[in-house]
Image (cartoon, rainbow, N blue to C red):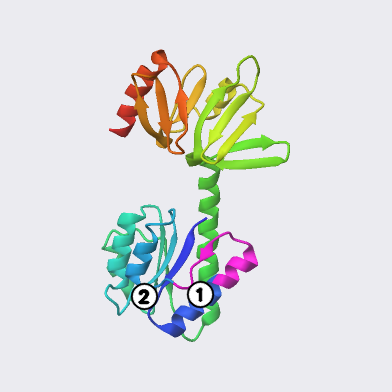
Amino acid sequence: MPTVFVVEDNVFQREMMLQYIEEVIKERGYGFQLDREIWQPRDVLKALENISIPNIYFLDIDLQLDQNGIDLGRELRSVDLTGYIIFVTSHADKIKEVIDQYISPFAYIVKSVSDSDAIKDDIAEVLAKIKEKENIAHQHNTFRLELPSGIVDLPLKDIIYFETVPRSKKTELRVLNGKYTINKYLKTIKESLADTAGFISFKSYIINLENVVSVNKEEGFILFKDNHTLYVGQRIITKFYEAFTAYRS
């Protein structure tokens, strides 16, 4: 789930925003992570080097720091293309200035000193819309795995490959942190992933190209991000190498 950053140089305003965001997250059971410590523009940008995206950014337009909110928003957009940027301002007329910058903010919140309840309501509405979008995105970016212990939605990005288990209707699924045995034919899984970018299918395999590190054509094996190797043989390796090269070009 996304991390929430609040970039506001007014201590009182920042604490108020943090409190309201924290209350909404707890009241509604959202899985967002609120970062209370990082609020300087350069620190937010630095933090993005070590966490996944997209994230949520509440930015004061009128920052009196090394960057104003608009400049930071522009830089954040170049790093987090699908991030949720929410501009916060005391002056509604500033919104036109943001529109002209092609930053594509998710929302605007106009601060009202005399009506703090309105600010919390606006925050709640924004976070609800983000949660709805994230839920939709999650449904399209996961593979549903039915296990004896329950249902697990695995992120597609964690999948390395699927492989037919010989002489059975089962399929082995290898992910970055382990493996599972699925009681489904590989053909059924192929159909469910038919329109999913980055996956390539063969008779006995479905391979996630995103998690491939290298291809050894001479010996016929593929090296993945978890250092696991898969031997597919000379017949498949040539076709796979061509597909992998085209995908990465």
Name the residue furthest bottom.
114
Kind of residue indicated by mark 2: Ala
The magenta-colored residue range is 22-37
In whole angstroms, how far apart are the C-alphas of marks 1 and 2?
22 Å
Residue 100 x/y as whole percent: 26, 63
User: Which residue does the image show at 52% across and 55% down from the upper left?
Assistant: 1
> Which residue has dot 1 on it?
18
The one nearer the camera, 47 or 128, is: 47
Secondary structure under tag 1 reads: helix
Q: Is residue 176 above or below residue 90?
A: above
Q: Earlier in the sequence, mark 1 or mark 2?
A: 1
Q: Nearer the viewer, residue 70 or 112?
A: 70
Q: Is residue 231 visible?
A: yes
Front of the two marks 1 and 2? 1
Taking the spot 56% from the left edge, 71% from the top edge, the residue there is 22
Say what secondary structure mark 2 lies in: helix
Q: Residues within 10 Å of mark 1 (few under 14, many from 20)?
A: some
Residue 1 vertical placement versus 182 (above, below) = below
- Outermost residue on the right side: it is 148
Q: Is residue 167 left or right of residue 141?
A: right
Name the residue nearer the viewer: 13 or 147.
147
Mark 2 sits on what residue?
92
Residue 179 placed where, x, y %?
Answer: 58, 34
